[in-house]
Amino acid sequence: MQFTDEQFKKDSEQLIDFIYKSPSPYHVVNNIAAVLNENGFIRLSEGKAWKINPSGRYYVIRGGSSIIAFNMPKAESYKGYNITATVILHLLR
């Protein structure tokens, strides 16, 4: 994937705006959760049993200051655990 100067500038401005709006870990988690909600992720509660569906997109917040998000694979392609880290900028685009 080739990045242009224009795309780099746009991504940089989005990151700076995100940092400006996130002065504490609690703000960061709240802002990431908003982006995840806008992109079809479902919030799960640590205190309840989870109903996870193939191809589902989920996230969990702990203590208001940490967040983990994950995508479930399609049932037919599931062969075990996959751990993936994704930069939030991909969701901001």
Image: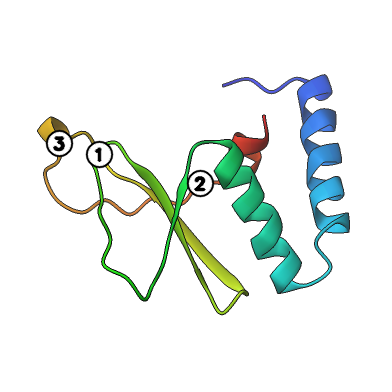
Q: Which SS class for mark 3?
A: helix
Amino acid of disc 3: Ala
Q: Is 78 drawn above or below residue 66 in the view shown?
A: above
Residue located beneath label 1 in the image: 73
> Measuring 56% from the left and 21% from the top, which residue is drawn there?
1
Residue located beneath label 3 in the image: 75
Q: Residues within 10 Å of mark 2 (few under 14, many from 20)?
A: few
Q: Residues within 10 Å of mark 3 (few under 14, many from 20)?
A: few
Q: Nearer the viewer, residue 63 or 69?
A: 63
Q: Position of residue 18 (x, y in %)?
A: 80, 50
Which of the colour schemes (rainbow, by chain, secondary structure, one colour) is used? rainbow
In the drawing, does residue 28 fall left or right of residue 63?
right
Quarter occupied by residue 2: top right
Label at residue 86? 2
Q: Residues within 10 Å of mark 1 (few under 14, many from 20)?
A: some
Amino acid of disc 2: Thr
